[in-house]
Amino acid sequence: MESINELKIDLEEQSLRALLNTQTHKDCKLVAEGDSWFAYPLVQDIIDHLRQMGYAIKNHSKSGDTLENMVYGTGFSIADRVHRAINYGPISLIETLRSVKNLQPRFVLLSAGGNDVVGPELTQYLNHKRSGLPLFRESFFRGSIDGYIRSAIITFMEKVWSVDPHIHIIMHGYDYAIPNGTQYEFAGISFAGPWVLPAFAREAITDRAEQDQIIRQLVDIFNELLISLDNSHPNFHHIDLRGMFPDEAQWHNEIHLKSEEYAQVAALFHKKIVEILNYNPVTVWGNAAAPGQ
């Protein structure tokens, strides 16, 4: 039986061959940029499931990546001898745009924003329980979402459309994370996380109902942004996942779903593509991208 890692490698290799296959129609080609929801090592993620459906995907996603890095570039080094900081520039964006130019896909998929909020960054949006202030700094968070996050997503869209103004960009919002302290773990070894519960613990927000309420506000405000962009940009499309995965058993850890659940999200991406094109490209074009072809 193939391991998850072997399966992922096989799917990627088949997908890359399909991208080079002149018989693969552009409606079956996807370029993806994103975080761990598109690049999760321990289970089949959204991209894996879309590849199994028959889409040929060039995936630039990286686990733990931020929207800020995807668009602006946060990689850096310090030149000690000259006491100078060096930023490497928007490497991820350049690579994504190169793929858009070379592959000429009909769709670009985006999964981003979660890592800009969860983790150590989350504490800046919270007030300490003993301060007597509202636990959630809503106006501050809305300012970040409506300002910096909105600007970054719009910049990404505009850069993609500068290469091809007809491309459709599809981006999911997240569902409500589970603040239960579970980690990114394999074979009993913890590699990362937890991302949510420690931030609440630092601010003495230990009541689960209060935690869930804050997470709901965070996710709702982020999705409201994506809905507004969907309404104002005809070639930008939002996939709303809120409330789809209410059971902790559906989550691999605090912020990652299990394979079955990622399959459901992949199905929504496929449904959106079919809706935009008004036909099923994988079926019509003979599935040149499908595994085993």
Image (cartoon, helix red, strand yellow):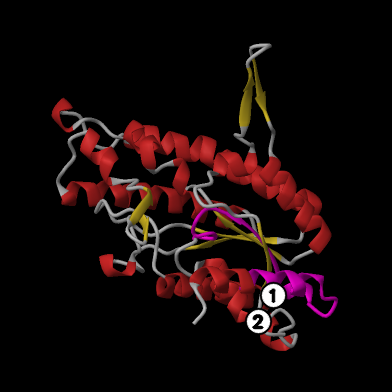
| N-term-proximal mark, 2 vs 1 | 1
* Secondary structure beneath label 1: helix
Label 2–label 1 contact, CB within 8 A: yes
Q: Position of residue 191 (x, y in %)?
A: 40, 50
41 in relation to 78, above or below? below
* Residue 24 belongs to magenta span: yes
Please state which amino acid type lies under the numbered disc 1: Gln
Q: Residues within 10 Å of mark 2 (few under 14, many from 20)?
A: many
Q: Residue at x 53, y 46 (%)?
A: 65
Residue 29 position by quadrant: bottom right
Left/right placement of residue 118 relative to residue 94 reads left
What quarter of the picture does the C terminus occupy?
Answer: bottom right
Residue, disc 2: 291
* Disc on res. 14: 1
Left or right of 264: which side holds 65? right
Q: Residue 93 is drawn in which quadrant?
A: top right
Q: Is residue 149 magenta?
A: no
Question: Which one is nearer the viewer's eye here, 222 or 292?
Answer: 292
Residue range corresponding to the magenta coloring: 11-40
Image mark for residue 126: none
